[in-house]
Image (cartoon, rainbow, N blue to C red):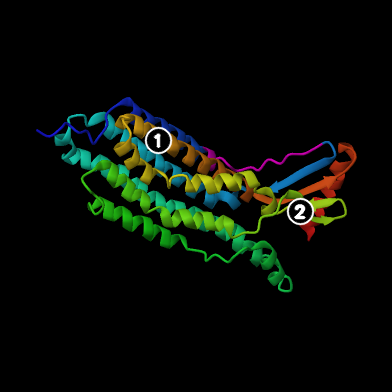
Amino acid sequence: MMPNIRFFDNTILTWGTDYAICIIMIYAAYLCLRATTYASSSSSSSFVRILQDPSQSKSLRIKSACLFLSYAISVFAGGYAHYTFTGGVEQLNTLAFRIWWTICVGSVTAAGGFMGACGSEICKRIHHNNNNNTTTSSSSSNENTRTVFRLVHVHDVLWVIYGGYLTWVCIMGGISYKRPACDIFVAGTSQFVPTMYCILSVLSVKWEEHIKNGERNGTVVVVHHHGVIRRWFRYMFYIGFALNAPLLPSYPCYIQYTSLSLGVVNAILHSNLTLAWGMQALSLRHFCQAFNLVENVEVESSSSSSSSPLCGSAIGKKKDE
């Protein structure tokens, strides 16, 4: 008689963490949609006024929200399946299970398209727009100083085709391997291309810090996107998108070489997902906030009373120009 091997865990460690991640991802999508302002710190010796336009970040905010909602749909469907289908292998062969698990796996493949679209938006806004906004005489110099390497901008239509085609393959059963966990990991590998594109879109820029990047003119410092997207959030961006990579090799190692139950293993991997997706959410929210920035003018002064009129006149001058 064959041992009673469980391939589909139904404990709260699995479906409970799925539902918890779903709530966090819905909140992450909300934060990205609401990232319409950029807050700048000011000291007693400076007065900072920021001109912002929320429409500048609208595209990235929507794409980021779609990415995290696709994560939320995936873990919700997975949690529901783990909670509901407790009757063994027989229930895993029903049409109802296939529908729910297709939603779970298909959301993962669809997320790859949204992820790539986020990378394209970052590439367009930071990499290409900065070069296009320079004068002819200084465009070559600007590209050399602000670009580590040139990254091709991938149009959103291509990401729609990418995510849509893989999702269609999933719906038709093309990535079904009769093991639910295997299906998820195979779908997850489809995110390799958009993950690398997102990371490269940020690595392709020569980042400079707030003061070094400022264009000084007397006491006025004008800071561009290169200066307001902070180093810590860029590191968080890199780590967050790369942190899912260890999940695939670690899962079989946990199952094969440890005595941990499947529920505990799933809870560990879900904790990794929460950390990775949470870092993605915080960093993308920061990018959205930075893209709202139209003009950031910092005026050094000895007192706040004398700096306010100066800042107003400085901004007025920039508007006239």
Left or right for 312, reference 50? right
Question: How many numbered badges does the structure rendering display?
Answer: 2
Q: Amino acid at mark 2?
A: Lys
Q: Residue at x 60, y 64 (%)?
A: 128
Residue 270: mark: 1
Mark 2 or mark 1: whose residue is earlier in sequence: 2
Which range of residues does the magenta coloring cover?
Answer: 31-43
Does residue 53 appear in this view?
Answer: no
Q: CA distance from mark 2 to mark 1?
A: 40 Å
Question: Which sits in the foreground, 245 or 284?
Answer: 245
Q: Residues within 10 Å of mark 2 (few under 14, many from 20)?
A: few
* Location of residue 94 in the rendering, given as x and y in whole percent from the top left corner: 16, 39
Residue 37 within the magenta-colored segment of the rendering: yes
- The residue lying furthest to the bottom in this view is 137
Q: Residues within 10 Å of mark 1 (few under 14, many from 20)?
A: many
What SS does tag 1 mark? helix
Q: Residue furthest top?
A: 12
Q: Which mark is residue 212?
A: 2
Residue shown at 24%/54% (left/top)? 174
